[in-house]
Amino acid sequence: MTQQTPATLDIDKDLLRFTPKQIIATQTADAHQFTLFGGSRGPGKSYWLRWYPVRKLLEYATHGLRGVRWGLFCEDYPALKDRQISKISVEFPEWLGVLKDSKEHGLAYHLAEEYGGGIIALRNLDDPSKYMSAEFGGISVDELTKNTVDTFNLLRGSLRWPGIPKPRFTGATNPGGIGHAWVKDYFIDKIFPSELRPLYDEFGFVPALPDDNPHLDTAYWQMLETLPPNLAKAWRHGDWSIFAGQVFKEFSHEKHVCKYGDVPNEGVNIRGVDWGYTNPFACLWGRKELDTGRIWIYREAYTRGLTDRQQAQMIKDMTPPDEKIAMTFADPAMWTKKNAGNIVTDTAKEYGTIGVPLSRADNSRVNGVRKIHRLLGNLPDGRPGLMIAEECQNLIKQLQNLAASGKDPEDVDTDQEDHCFDALKYLLSNVKDGTNEKPALRFTHPLEGVKGL
Ligand SMILES: Nc1ncnc2c1ncn2[C@@H]1O[C@H](COP(=O)(O)OP(=O)(O)OP(=O)(O)O)[C@@H](O)[C@H]1O
Ligand SMILES: [Mg+2]
């Protein structure tokens, strides 16, 4: 890219030099509020993601909107440095502006005053809550699937700028990662939670493949051509149907999520509780239909920072008085003895004093995973064995996002947010696990010598 300032320069032809696919991405982003570009490795996503804001800021300047701030985000600082900062420092011509760290804007690229003084703030998302009250005239996120839907919602809240009625959000990504499911839902399948449905037409997706980028070098192509089959499907061919390591690949919003009103009134109610204080505590309410065995999860409690008794009180308050609960299965760790002042007690006892009696749950993660797999499949009536009311947002999110343990593909990775999965696993304690194995039965007190049976 030339460092000379020509008297007149064509922004598109001489500065951005977008590939045809990047031009389509630009048109799509101009026409929608939220645009996802890419969905495979190498089509020039990160390049487009940093240059599109330049184009937009220059365009705003021509309409008299000066000094607009655009946020360019990556999931953490090393990624930001590697994918964007280092590229900006060599790719953006010196006459266009300057990359600098300032008190007011942090690390940012400042377009020259002659070009409107727009700012591209370079930010990482290791703690998204930092941006709670920030304001941006546009936001771009590289590798969007590395982020949860909560981060997306938080960033959406920061999309506002005086004079810009529709501040743009652009994302670029490969399939896979903790945010795979929601990104696929919103941008590719266009399945939205009810509150987002009014924005249905504002979500655009421009699929692109490595073949769309004439600038890829041989080493990159070699990497792409030698990927193992699963990764090749996702990265080389942009197949979003599965991602490596996703535990419940069969879970789908369309099939398994229902309205609260669809939950049948008849059945046996069971609760599952996963204790937490610093980590969230989770309680799920489920109803088992007696004729089909289908389980409907119809309510969830999910919060942190509550004492044992407050948790029990919350469960009690959320259960209507006329709703009979047959069993409340809970984490066996809740029976661990602890000292409270001079009294030895346990969480289960504390729950009991509030009127929430607990039963010890089956704690095996692998059993839980098997049961959920079985229930996600269809029953003889052609509908899944597990249905979840859309109010149970945390459970839905976790079932979509759970990744397998690196050591055992049948187990889940315990480093992720899995408290609702645990509560569901407990709730299903008395459900068959999908193997046909029946446990061997024995008595603690043998009946030897007892006559007359
Ligand atoms: N319009 C363009 N003009 C010049 N070079 C480009 C253009 N688009 C992309 N490139 C170059 O192609 C290479 C790959 O682009 P980029 O890193 O943006 O792809 P990506 O889709 O983000 O890849 P990955 O999946 O690895 O993150 C980079 O060297 C980038 O500078
Ligand atoms: Mg990239």
Image: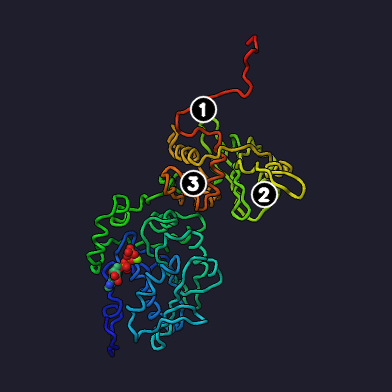
Tell me if residue 410 can be seen.
yes
- 175 and 231: which one is in front? 231
Screen quadrant of the C terminus: top right
Q: Which comes before the other along the chain, label 3 or label 2?
A: 3
C-alpha separation, residue under disc 1 versus residue under disc 3: 33 Å
Q: Is residue 406 above or below residue 160?
A: above
- Residue wearing tag 2: 311
Looking at the image, which residue sits at the far right?
342
Q: Residue at x 61, y 43 (%)?
A: 333
C-alpha separation, residue under disc 3 versus residue under disc 2: 26 Å
Q: Is residue 241 above or below residue 109?
A: above
- Secondary-structure class at tag 3: strand
- Secondary-structure class at tag 1: loop
The mark lying in front, picked from 3 and 2, is 2
Residue 360 shown left or right of residue 1 in the figure: right
> Residue 101: horizontal and vertical position, in percent?
46, 81
Dot label at residue 257: 3
Q: Residue at x 45, y 69 (%)?
A: 77
Q: Residue at x 27, y 58 (%)?
A: 224
Give the total of numbered labels. Answer: 3
Q: Amino acid at mark 2?
A: Gln
- Residue wearing tag 1: 439
Q: Amino acid at mark 1?
A: Pro
